[in-house]
Image (cartoon, helix red, strand yellow):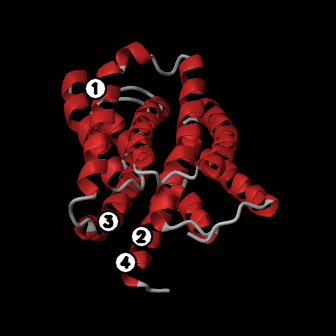
Amino acid sequence: MEFELTWQLVTILFGVAIVAGFIDAIAGGGGLLTIPALLWAGLSPAHALATNKLQACGGSFFASLYFVRKGLVKISELKLPLACAFVGAAIGTLTVQAIDASILQLALPFLILAIGMYFLFSPKITDDDRHRVLTPTVFSFTAGLSIGFYDGFFGPATGSFFALAFVSLAGFGLAKATAHAKLLNFATNISSLIFFALGGKVVWLLGGIMLLGQALGATLGSRMVMTKGSSIIKPLVVSMSLVMSIKLLNDHFSFF
């Protein structure tokens, strides 16, 4: 791994982390910025993914903390979903080391695009709660466990998947769904980070610096969720879904 930590590099990656944290707090997809930036800095793919999980923990933690303090999320009601998401991510992290993820890489852009289209065209998505489809327990063992597994296995757009699940299955309004999604995403980030750390892949100093940037960006983004609600979340989710789909398709087929 050819990597040298300079002040110029620190400044650039800190700035990237701020922007990524802001985007992640609202719509997810900040990894589209941070992972390429870490690879550009000279980290190997494994070290980039591992270090990205460390800095992502900062963004998801501080966004979650803000939502909890503002009363949009009650941790006591999320114990089971958090546990299922954590376990799912652990299983996914172990699984990805043993099997080929190429099939998922091909299907993922279309899944993410479908999320964007759902948020764009569904008339039901507002900041108001509606009828839930699944009980909290069933939701935990289906959406919580499976999306947690996905984050450990692959990762892009995990926050969007969680938000979609809370809207479509739990009956949450969009701002409330975004806040709850961030807590579950924090659980999956921590779980994956633990297993990456055990493998010695985390660049702790650089990841810690970017974590501070993520924290700042996430705090700003979470405030936008509270004040703007669906008026900012919906267009940003749609935009990030489109960008992520194009990026992942290009990575697979090299169109550009």
| Residue that carries the numbered disc 2 in the rendered image | 248
CA–CA distance in space, label 2 to label 4: 6 Å
Quadrant in which residue 164 is drawn: top left
Q: Secondary structure at mark 3?
A: helix
Residue at image point 62% right, 39% down: 218
Residue 53, above or below 251: above
Please provide percent x and percent y for residue 202.
52, 51
Residue at image mark 3? 110
Tell me whether the residue at label 1 lies in contact with that at label 2, contact meaning CB atoms closer than 8 angstroms. Answer: no
Report the Cα–Cα distance between label 4 and label 1: 39 Å
**Mark 2, secondary structure of its residue:** helix
- Residue underneath mark 4: 252
Closer to viewer: mark 4 or mark 3: 4
Residue type at mark 4? His
Write down the residue under mark 1: 131
Crowd class of label 4 (few under 14; some 14 to 19; many from 20; radius 10 Å): few
Give the side of residue 156 with respect to residue 61, left or right. Answer: left
